[in-house]
C-alpha cells in the first residue's frame, strides 16, 4: 500500500471528523436554552444566568465557543456533565469500554457465522442452506433491534425461568458467568440484523465471483473444487464484504443505543439517551462525537484493510 | 414498464412482496375502519388479556383492544415510512443531481460534506435531529427524511455521473442541444428509475427507524396507536401479557419485509445480473 | 458423418446441446461432428450466437447450469469426455487439455501473483514441489517470450499489459504439455500488432509440442494464416468443413461465401472496383425453434423451396464438405445482384483528380487530459497532464473519406470528440466558412455541420427515448421542423437507413445492434452535416452486420456529398472504404496517403508493422514478419523526439531521439520519419504469394530488417 494512499485516507478521515464536530456542535447550538439554563433550572434569575454564562464562556461569539470546545475535545477536556456533574470524558470512556465489549463480541460472532453461511448459500445455490439464509435474512433485516430485544426479554428472561438477567451489566471481575450472562441476550439482539446483512452480502459477492472468468480458468486448470472455492473465489469475494462489515458498524452503533436501552446496559448508547432526555449538552456532544468518531475509524480501517488485501488500489 | 411488471411476476420474491404490499395498501385504506373497537377505549375489566373471541389479539394494560390499535397504527406507520422516504429522496436527489450536474469544485465540496453526514450512523443522526426539533411524529418523520437524504444524494450523484458520461448525452451536446433539454429530457429520466428503486428499499428502513424513535420516546406520543410506542408501553407488562409485544412486533416485520422484498425484486427486474455458476 | 479413423485425437460425434431458458429450449448445437488429429490445427469459424463457444466448453465438460447435452459424444484419445467423473475431469483439465480465453484481463485472478497462477498448475498435475514449480514457471514464461520471467512472476495481473497477460495464460495452457489445446478467440481483445505476435507464438509452440489445436474465431483472416482445416458454424450447425485453402478459395456453402464477401479484403477481385460489401439481410435464426431444412435458408440469396425441407447434413469429399443443396453454385454466384445498394462510385476514380480547396481542415490540434484533484491542489502538487492528441493536422475535401487508423491509446477517439466539440482542444479547425479556434467557443453553425456516430449504439441512444424522437430531435433543432412535417421527415430518414416506419414508436432496447447503429447514423445525417465522424462504428458488431452498416455509411455519404472521417483499428476495412488514410501513433499522425488497392511501400515503419499484422482472408498469401517489441509508452510521458522510436524495428540511432521531419513519399503521401524517402521506398513488399497452393499458413518468415 502506498504512503500516498494512506495519507489521502487519513486526511479524508480527519476532514470528516472535523465536519462531524461542526455538525454536532451546530445541532447543540440550535437547541433552545443553553447549559447555564440547564444547570440553574427554569426559575433562575437573569443575573445568575448571566454570571454563569460568562463563567462557562457562553457569552463569547459562536466560533470562539466552537474553538474552545473543539480544543477541549482534542486535549481530553470534554467539559462537565450538567446532569451528573462528572467530567464528560471519564464517563464516555468508561461507557465506551463496555459498549466496545458488547459490539466487539457481536461483530465477532456475526462474522464467524455469517461469512460461512453466505459462502455455503452461494456454492449450493437453490439448496437448503441458500433458502434458509434467504428467508432468515429477510426476517433479519426487517425486524428492528428493539423488537428483537424486547421479544428476547419476553421469552428468555422471564423471571420464572431465571436463565438470563433481564438487564444490567456485570464486570468480568464478578466472575465469568455473570459477565457472560449479562451479554448473551444483548449480543443476540444485535446479531440478528447484522447476520442478515453480512450473509446476504457474502452470498451475492460469492455468486458474482463464481461467475467470473478467472474462476472458470481455475476450474479448467484442473484444480480441485476446494482450491477453486477457497483460493480463487473466496479471496476475491471477501474484498467487498470487508467494506460491508465496516458499514455495518454504523448499524451496530444504532443498534447499541436501542439494545442498551432495552437491557439497561450501561454503555455509550444509554449515556447518549440519558444526555438527550436530560438535555445534557456537554454529555450529548461528547457521546455523539465519540460514536461518529468510532464509525469514521471503522471506515478508515476497512479502507486500509481493503487496500492491503487488494493491491490494485495503490495505483489509483 | 409492462416488461418490468412481467419480470417482477416471474420471481417469487416479487410476487410475495407485491402481495404483502397490496395488503399494506389495504391496511392504509381500510385498516382503521376494520377495527372492531375504538383503539383508545378502555375496557377496565379486561386488562392484559391474551387473545380471545372478543379480543382477537388480547388487550393492553388499560384494557384497550390490541387488534384495533394495530389496525389503527398501520396507516400511520406505513404513511410515515412512505412520506419520510419521499421527502428524503426528494431532498437527496435534488442535492445529488445538482452536484453531479455541476461537477468540478462545487461537486467535490458538496460531496465531501455529504460524506461527513453519511459518516454519522443513521439512528444517531435521526436522534440528534429529533433532539433539536422536539419529540413528535411529524418531527420524527422529518428527522428520518433528513437522515435518509445523504445516502440518496450519494446514489443520485453516482447515477448522474454515469449518465452524464454516456454517449447519448455527448450526442446531444454535439448536435447543439441546450443545457435545460439535456438535463430534463436526456438525463433525468435515466436518473430517476434507479433512484426510485433504491428508495423503495429505504421505506423499510424509514419504518423501522420511525418505530425505533417512537420506542425510545422520541417519536409518536401517547395515546397514539403507534406500533413502536405500543411496544415501549408494553415493556412494564410484557411478562404478564407477551402478546402486547408480539403483535406490533410482527406487524412492523411484515411491513418491512413487504418493502424489502418488493424493492429487491424491482431492482433485480430492472437490472438483471446474469449469474452463471457451475 | 463418419468418425475419423484416428483414435488418437479429438473426435466430436453428433453433439447436440440445448439451454433451458425462460422462453423454452434454446437449441445451441445440433448434430455437430468434428475431428482433430494429433498435431493438427483446426479452425472453428462463426459469429456470436453460432454456438462455437458452447462447443469449446463442451469439450472440457464445462457448460452452463442450464445446458443439457441432448446427444452425441466427445472423445479424446478414445476416452469419453462427456460425463467423465469429476476426479477424472479434474485430472484431464489443464493436464491433457489446455485452454486459452478471449479476454486475458478477466481470465486471470486479480488477487494472485502471476507466478503462482502458473505454478499451481504444475504442482497440481506434475507433482512438483514449490521450488521446482517456480523454476519451471520461469522456464515457461521464458518460452512464451516474456523478457524477465522472475520479475513477471512477482507481478499481479493489473501490473502487466494485455499482451503479457495473454502470454502468461498461454504459458499456463502449455505448462503440462497438453495433447489438445482449445483457443477461444485468443487475440480478439488485443491490438493488431500484439495479436500478430501472439499468433506467432501460438504457431511456434504448437509446432514445437505437436499438440492438436482447436482454434475458435470469427476472423477468416486468422484461420487463413494458422489453420490447415476449418469448420464453419452457423446457428448451431456446421455448414461447411474442409481444407482451409479450398474453403476460402471456392466456398461450397452460401453462408461461407457471404461471410467471405462481407469481410473487407484488399486482395479480392472487386476491391478496386467499388466501395460496397456484400451484406446479410434478416436476422440469425431463432434457435428456440430452429427452422427445418437449411439453417441459413432465411437469409440465403439463392434459396429454393427444397432448401427448407428435411435436415441437411454435411456432404461431399472429405477435403471440402458442405451442407448446401446448391454447393456447386456458391463460389460463382453473383451476390451483388441481390444487393439493394448498387455500387455507385468507383473507388480510386473518386480520389483521383480532386483539386478543389479542402472543405475541412485541422491544424495543429492538441488535446490534453488534466487531472488535478482537490487534495493535490491543496498540497500544491502539479496537475497530471496526459497529452492524448499531440499536434495533428489534416484536410478533407467534400465527399471525401479519410480513414484514421491506429491502435488503442493512439488518441483517435479523443481527436474525434474534439472535432465535434466534445473535448476542449488547442489548435484551429475550419469547416466550409466556419472556423473554430481552440479554447474559444464553436461558431453557431458548427454543431449542425459536424456530426458524430459513436462506437456503441447501446450507449449512444437514449434508452428512454423513442426512435422517432431520437431521429426527430436534430431535425427540429436544425431545420425547425415540427408536427406532421417533423414526423414525415423522421419517417423519411428511417426509410433511408432501411428501417420500417413503425420503428419510430420503438425504444432502442427493442432493436438489434445493427438496427440501433442505423438509427445513430440517421441521427447523424439528418441535420444535413458537411462532416461526419464515424468512430469505430462497426467494431461492436458481427461481421455479417458490419457490411450493411458500412455500405449504408458509404451510400449516405455519396448522396449527401459529406466529408467523412472513418476511425477504425481495422486496416482492411479502411483500405476498402477510405480515399485516404492517416495512421496515428501515440497522439500523432505518422503517415498520410491516398488509397488505391492494397497498401504497399514506401511505408512509415509503424504502418509497415500494422500492415504486416492485419490478417487477410486470402489463402496462399504470406506476410513478411514485422513485429513490435515492448509496450506502448505512456502518453503522460512520451519519448522525446520520434514517438515511435522505443519500438521501431528500423531505428536509425540517436537521431531518432530528435523530432522527425515530414518526408514526402509521393503525391499526397508523407510520413513523419527520420529515414530517407529512398530508404522507405526500398522496404520490400509486405505480402507475397506463397507458392504452395494447399498450405493454409505461410510457414516462412521474412528476414528481419
Image (cartoon, rainbow, N blue to C red):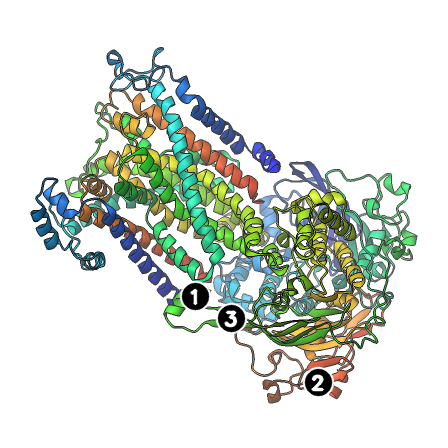
Q: Establish if B156 lies above or below C447.
A: above
Query: From the viewer's perspective, is the residue at label 2 or at label 3 nearer?
Result: 2
Specify the subunit that label 3 lies on: C
Which secondary structure, mark 1? loop
Q: Nearer the viewer, residue B230 or B249?
A: B230
- Do circles 1 and 2 both sit on a common chain? yes
Is residue A266 shown left or right of residue A201? left
Is residue B34 shown left or right of residue B129? right
Q: What residue is rendered at 12% in x and 40% in y?
A: A42
Question: Which residue is labeled 3 in the image?
Answer: C150
Where does residue A141 sit, x and y in percent of width and height? Answer: 40, 37
Quarter occupied by residue C671: bottom right
Would residue B152 be seen by someone viewing this image from the given angle? Answer: no
Q: Establish if C294 lies above or below B249.
A: below
Question: Which residue is labeled 1 in the image?
Answer: C373
Where does residue B68 sit, x and y in percent of width and height? Answer: 35, 19
Which secondary structure, mark 2? strand
- Do circles 2 and 3 both sit on a common chain? yes
Question: Which residue is labeled 2 in the image?
Answer: C663
Specify the subunit that label 1 lies on: C
Q: Establish if A278 lies above or below C379.
A: above
Amino acid at each position: 500500500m502506498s504512503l500516498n494512499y494512506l495519507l489521502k485516507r487519513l486526511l479524508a478521515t480527519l476532514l470528516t471528523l472535523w465536519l462531524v464536530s461542526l455538525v454536532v456542535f451546530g445541532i447543540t447550538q440550535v437547541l433552545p436554552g443553553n447549559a447555564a439554563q440547564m444547570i440553574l433550572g427554569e426559575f433562575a434569575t437573569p443575573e445568575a444566568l448571566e454570571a454563569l454564562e460568562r463563567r462557562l464562556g457562553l457569552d463569547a461569539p459562536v466560533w470562539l465557543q466552537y474553538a474552545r470546545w473543539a480544543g477541549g475535545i482534542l486535549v481530553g477536556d470534554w467539559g462537565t456533565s450538567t446532569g451528573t456533574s462528572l467530567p464528560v470524558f471519564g464517563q464516555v470512556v468508561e461507557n465506551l469500554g463496555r459498549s466496545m465489549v458488547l459490539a466487539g463480541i457481536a461483530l465477532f460472532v456475526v462474522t464467524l457465522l455469517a461469512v460461512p453461511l453466505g459462502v455455503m448459500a452461494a456454492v449450493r445455490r437453490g439448496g437448503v442452506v441458500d433458502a434458509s439464509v434467504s428467508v432468515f435474512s429477510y426476517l433479519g433485516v426487517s425486524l428492528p433491534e428493539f423488537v428483537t430485544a424486547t421479544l428476547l426479554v419476553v421469552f428468555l428472561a422471564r423471571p420464572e425461568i431465571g436463565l438470563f438477567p433481564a438487564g444490567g451489566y456485570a464486570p468480568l471481575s464478578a466472575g465469568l458467568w455473570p459477565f457472560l450472562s449479562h451479554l448473551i441476550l444483548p449480543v443476540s439482539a444485535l446479531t440478528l440484523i447484522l447476520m442478515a446483512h453480512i450473509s446476504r452480502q457474502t452470498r451475492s459477492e460469492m455468486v458474482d465471483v463464481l461467475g467470473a472468468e478467472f474462476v472458470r480458468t481455475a476450474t479448467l486448470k484442473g484444480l480441485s473444487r476446494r482450491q477453486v472455492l477457497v483460493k480463487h473465489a473466496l479471496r476475491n469475494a471477501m474484498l467487498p464484504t470487508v467494506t460491508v462489515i465496516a458499514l455495518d458498524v454504523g448499524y451496530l452503533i444504532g443498534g447499541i443505543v436501542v439494545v442498551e436501552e432495552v437491557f439497561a446496559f450501561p454503555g455509550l448508547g444509554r449515556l447518549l439517551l440519558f444526555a438527550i432526555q436530560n438535555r445534557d449538552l456537554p454529555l450529548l456532544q461528547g457521546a455523539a462525537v465519540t460514536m461518529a468518531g468510532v464509525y469514521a475509524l471503522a471506515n478508515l480501517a476497512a479502507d486500509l484493510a481493503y487496500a492491503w488485501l487488494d493491491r490494485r488500489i495503490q495505483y489509483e | 414498464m409492462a416488461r418490468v411488471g412481467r419480470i417482477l411476476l416471474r420471481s417469487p420474491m416479487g410476487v410475495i412482496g407485491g402481495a404483502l404490499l397490496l395488503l399494506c395498501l389495504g391496511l392504509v385504506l381500510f385498516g382503521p375502519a376494520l377495527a372492531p373497537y375504538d383503539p383508545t377505549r378502555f375496557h377496565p375489566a379486561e386488562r392484559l388479556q391474551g387473545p380471545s373471541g372478543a379480543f382477537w389479539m388480547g388487550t393492553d394494560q388499560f384494557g384497550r383492544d390490541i387488534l384495533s390499535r394495530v389496525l389503527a397504527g398501520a396507516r400511520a406507520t406505513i404513511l410515515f415510512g412512505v412520506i419520510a422516504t419521499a421527502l428524503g429522496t426528494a431532498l437527496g436527489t435534488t442535492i445529488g443531481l445538482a452536484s453531479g450536474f455541476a461537477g468540478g469544485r462545487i461537486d467535490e465540496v458538496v460531496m465531501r460534506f455529504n460524506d461527513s453526514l453519511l459518516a454519522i450512523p443513521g439512528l444517531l443522526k435521526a436522534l440528534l435531529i429529533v433532539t433539536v426539533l422536539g419529540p413528535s411524529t411529524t418531527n420524527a418523520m422529518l428527522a428520518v427524511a433528513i437522515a435518509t437524504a445523504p445516502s440518496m444524494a450519494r446514489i443520485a450523484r453516482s447515477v448522474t455521473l454515469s449518465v452524464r458520461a454516456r454517449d447519448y448525452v455527448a450526442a446531444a451536446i454535439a448536435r447543439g442541444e441546450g443545457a435545460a433539454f439535456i438535463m430534463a429530457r436526456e438525463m433525468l429520466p435515466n436518473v430517476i428509475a434507479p433512484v426510485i428503486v433504491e428508495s423503495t428499499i429505504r421505506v423499510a428502513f424509514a419504518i423501522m427507524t420511525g418505530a425505533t424513535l417512537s420506542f425510545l420516546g422520541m417519536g409518536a406520543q401517547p395515546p397514539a396507536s403507534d406500533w413502536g410506542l405500543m411496544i415501549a408501553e408494553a415493556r412494564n407488562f410484557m411478562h404478564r401479557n407477551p402478546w402486547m409485544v408480539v403483535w406490533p412486533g410482527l406487524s412492523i416485520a411484515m411491513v418491512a419485509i413487504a418493502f424489502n422484498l418488493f424493492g429487491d425484486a424491482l431492482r433485480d427486474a430492472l437490472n438483471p445480473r446474469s449469474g452463471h455458476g457451475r | 458423418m463418419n468418425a475419423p479413423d484416428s483414435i488418437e485425437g479429438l473426435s466430436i460425434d453428433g453433439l447436440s446441446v440445448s439451454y433451458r431458458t425462460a422462453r423454452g429450449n434454446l437449441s445451441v448445437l445440433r448434430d455437430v461432428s468434428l475431428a482433430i488429429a494429433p498435431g493438427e490445427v483446426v479452425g472453428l469459424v462463426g459469429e456470436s450466437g453460432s454456438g462455437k463457444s458452447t462447443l469449446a466448453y463442451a469439450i472440457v465438460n464445462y457448460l452452463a447450469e442450464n445446458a443439457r447435452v441432448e446427444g452425441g459424444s466427445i472423445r479424446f484419445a478414445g476416452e469419453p469426455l462427456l460425463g467423465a467423473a469429476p476426479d477424472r475431469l479434474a485430472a484431464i483439465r489443464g493436464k491433457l487439455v489446455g485452454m486459452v480465453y478471449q479476454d486475458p484481463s478477466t481470465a486471470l485472478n486479480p488477487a494472485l501473483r502471476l507466478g503462482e497462477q502458473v505454478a499451481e498448475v504444475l504442482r497440481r498435475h506434475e507433482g512438483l514441489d514449490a521450488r521446482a514449480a517456480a523454476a519451471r514457471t520461469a522456464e515457461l514464461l521464458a518460452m512464451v517470450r516474456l523478457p524477465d520471467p522472475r520479475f513477471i512472476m512477482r507481478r499481479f495481473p493489473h501490473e502487466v499489459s494485455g499482451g503479457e497477460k495473454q502470454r502468461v495464460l498461454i504459458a499456463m495452457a502449455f505448462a503440462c504439455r497438453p495433447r489438445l489445446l482449445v483457443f477461444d478467440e485468443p487475440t480478439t481483445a488485443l491490438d493488431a500488432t500484439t495479436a500478430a505476435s501472439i499468433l506467432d507464438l501460438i504457431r511456434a509452440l504448437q509446432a514445437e509440442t505437436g499438440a492438436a489445436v482447436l482454434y475458435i474465431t470469427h476472423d477468416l483472416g486468422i484461420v487463413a494464416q494458422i489453420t490447415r482445416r476449418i469448420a464453419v458454424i452457423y446457428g448451431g450447425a456446421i455448414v461447411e468443413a474442409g481444407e482451409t485453402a479450398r474453403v476460402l478459395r471456392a466456398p461450397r456453402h452460401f453462408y461461407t461465401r457471404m461471410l467471405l464477401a462481407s469481410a473487407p479484403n484488399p486482395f479480392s477481385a472487386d476491391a478496386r472496383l467499388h466501395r460496397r460489401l456484400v451484406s446479410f439481410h434478416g436476422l440469425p435464426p431463432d434457435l428456440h425453434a430452429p427452422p427445418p431444412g437449411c439453417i441459413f435458408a432465411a437469409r440465403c440469396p439463392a434459396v429454393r423451396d427444397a432448401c427448407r425441407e428435411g435436415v441437411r447434413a454435411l456432404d461431399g469429399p472429405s477435403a471440402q464438405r458442405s451442407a448446401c443443396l446448391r454447393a456447386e453454385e456458391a463460389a460463382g454466384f453473383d451476390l451483388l445482384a441481390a444487393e439493394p445498394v448498387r455500387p455507385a462510385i468507383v473507388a480510386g476514380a473518386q480520389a483521383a483528380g480532386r483539386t478543389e480547396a479542402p472543405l475541412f481542415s485541422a491544424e495543429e490540434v492538441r488535446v490534453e487530459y488534466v487531472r488535478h484533484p482537490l487534495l493535490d491542489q491543496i498540497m500544491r502538487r502539479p496537475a497530471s497532464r496526459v497529452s492524448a492528441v499531440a499536434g495533428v493536422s489534416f484536410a478533407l475535401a467534400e465527399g471525401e473519406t479519410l480513414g484514421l487508423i491506429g491502435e488503442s491509446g493512439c488518441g483517435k477517439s479523443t481527436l474525434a470528440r474534439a472535432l465535434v466539440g466534445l473535448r476542449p482542444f488547442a489548435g484551429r479547425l475550419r469547416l466550409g466558412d466556419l472556423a473554430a479556434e481552440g479554447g474559444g467557443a464553436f461558431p453557431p453553425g458548427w454543431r449542425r455541420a459536424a456530426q458524430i456516430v459513436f462506437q456503441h449504439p447501446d450507449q449512444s441512444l437514449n434508452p428512454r427515448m423513442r426512435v422517432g424522437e431520437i431521429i426527430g430531435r436534430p431535425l427540429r433543432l436544425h431545420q425547425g421542423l415540427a408536427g406532421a412535417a417533423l414526423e414525415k421527415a423522421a419517417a423519411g430518414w428511417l426509410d433511408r437507413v432501411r428501417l420500417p416506419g413503425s420503428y419510430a414508436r420503438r425504444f432502442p432496447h427493442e432493436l438489434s445492434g445493427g438496427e440501433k447503429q442505423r438509427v445513430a447514423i440517421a441521427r447523424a445525417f439528418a441535420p444535413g452535416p458537411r462532416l461526419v465522424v464515424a468512430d469505430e462504428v462497426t467494431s461492436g458488431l458481427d461481421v455479417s452486420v458490419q457490411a450493411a452498416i458500412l455500405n449504408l455509411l458509404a451510400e449516405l455519404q455519396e448522396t449527401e456529398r459529406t466529408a467523412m472521417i472513418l476511425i477504425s483499428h481495422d486496416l482492411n476495412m479502411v483500405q476498402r472504404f477510405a480515399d485516404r488514410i492517416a495512421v496515428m501513433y501515440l497522439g500523432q499522425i505518422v503517415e498520410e496517403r491516398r488509397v488505391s488497392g492494397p497498401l504497399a511501400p514506401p511505408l512509415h515503419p509503424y504502418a509497415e508493422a500494422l500492415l504486416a499484422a492485419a490478417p487477410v482472408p486470402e489463402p496462399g498469401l504470406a506476410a513478411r514478419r514485422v513485429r513490435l517489441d515492448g509496450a506502448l509508452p505512456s502518453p503522460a510521458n512520451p519519448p522525446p523526439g520520434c514517438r515511435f522510436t522505443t519500438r521501431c524495428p528500423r531505428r536509425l540511432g540517436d537521431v531518432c531521439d530528435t523530432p522527425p521531419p515530414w518526408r514526402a513519399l509521393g503525391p499526397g503521401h508523407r510520413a513523419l520519419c527520420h529515414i530517407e524517402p529512398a530508404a522507405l521506398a526500398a522496404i520490400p513488399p509486405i505480402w507475397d504469394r506463397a507458392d504452395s497452393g494447399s498450405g493454409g499458413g505461410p510457414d516462412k518468415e521474412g528476414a528481419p530488417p
